[in-house]
Image (cartoon, coloured by chain):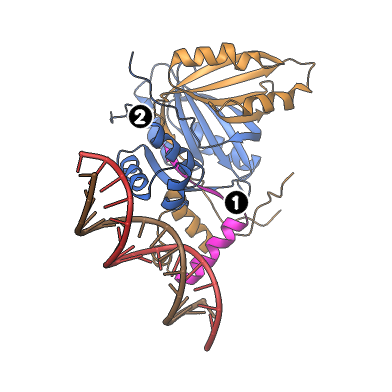
Chain colours: A orange, B blue, C red, D brown
Amino acid sequence: MAEQHPETLDTLDIRILDLLQDDVTLPVAEIAERVASSKTVVWRRMQRLIEGGVIRERVAIVDHHKVGLGIMVFAHVKMTRHNRDALPTFLDAVRKLPAVIECHTLMGDVDFLLKIVVPSVQDYEYFVWNKLSQIEGVQEISSSISMSQSINTTRLPIRASKPRA
Amino acid sequence: MAEQHPETLDTLDIRILDLLQDDVTLPVAEIAERVASSKTVVWRRMQRLIEGGVIRERVAIVDHHKVGLGIMVFAHVKMTRHNRDALPTFLDAVRKLPAVIECHTLMGDVDFLLKIVVPSVQDYEYFVWNKLSQIEGVQEISSSISMSQSINTTRLPIRASKPRA
DNA sequence: TATGAAAAGGGGTTGCT
DNA sequence: AGCAACCCCTTTTCATA
């Protein structure tokens, strides 16, 4: 397991992150102005946030409609009961499918929740029959098409970390 | 409705997007080298992609564990049948809840799928009772905690747009 | 009209105080 | 922590095909 415990973030860190979560292209000087601090301080904080892995990555977010990936689907995948060894196998297999942009292990009876993007419903049908259901140990797949994403953000609501109870 | 039809993207656009989806901080010169093109050409393409909205935004992705938002939950929300006017109300209300980072309208009987991040299970309990279930028209909420995110990327698998059939 | 080169400007980065 | 110099990258302009 990687170290993923909360870092100690003060108000300044949080305000910097708030801005960066909206726009990484903001000049350091402007961030400094907005958070009422200095260029040097903000720059050093940003380095710490990046090196400490608080900022995992800085990326371009692409509009899925604009690139012909109009269909977004959530697929609940249930695995056969007696083959728990198949879980890593499933993850390896699913990692090779670039249409799968999220894969969550859920508590409860549904084993995985996948978020998938494809060009069309036909493509999704193909994907399910020829890719997903072919993976060993997959027992049941139930799919829900997302008709619209009224909220779809990468922005996390960061607050000052509470001291551990 | 905003124009969201696929743009015509050639191989060069796609290769640029592939790099930018991983790292927006790459210098134009280096992108040019990697895609075997020139600085000027790549720069102009990037401008078009940004202005055309293909690149929706350029953001910092924050590790939710590192900022104390260790609990990620998917909530299926079912609305009361006879109050379809409540849908926009629901969306407005949910937009005011920063813990909700995604809200999808699904086909079928479940009306909404929400992705929510909170510090702890206790916070989620509070969130459901005092926020989510208080919204008018909400009939039923069923929640699944994500135990782990083995895939969690913003990267879309972009291919050359097929001509419309 | 699209490209390449090169100049000009701004911002990131570093070292010093 | 602040300041300032430096260097690199972005952005613009201009010349060319």
Q: Residue B143, relative to residue B165: is it above or below?
A: below
Left or right: residue C1 versus residue A156 is left
Is residue B26 in view? yes
Q: Residue at x 64, y 56 (%)?
A: A7
Q: Is residue A43 magenta?
A: yes
Q: Chain of mark 2?
A: B
Position of the N terminus of chain A, as image quadrant, is top right
Give the quarter of the image for residue A102. Answer: top right
Q: Which residue is mark 2?
A: B88
- Find numbered disc 2 in the image and state the secondary structure of the residue it sits on: helix
Q: Position of residue B102 (x, y in %)?
A: 48, 34
Q: Is residue A126 magenta?
A: no
Amino acid beneath label 2? Pro
Q: Residues within 10 Å of mark 2 (few under 14, many from 20)?
A: few
Q: Nearer the viewer, residue A31 or A162?
A: A31
Q: Residue A51, relative to residue A83: is it above or below?
A: below
**3D distance between C-alphas at marks 2 and 1:** 31 Å
Left or right: residue A59 versus residue C3 is right
Give the quarter of the image for residue A35. Answer: bottom left
Q: Which residue is mark 1?
A: B67
Q: Chain of mark 1?
A: B
Q: Residue B100, relative to residue D9: is it above or below?
A: above
Amino acid beneath label 1? Val
Give the quarter of the image for residue B86. Answer: top left
Q: How many marks?
A: 2
Q: Residue at x 52, y 12 (%)?
A: A126
Tell me where the magenta segment starts and ends, as one range.
A37-62
Left or right: residue A110 versus residue B14 is right
Q: Nearer the viewer, residue A136 or A165?
A: A136
Q: Residue at x 28, y 30 (%)?
A: B3
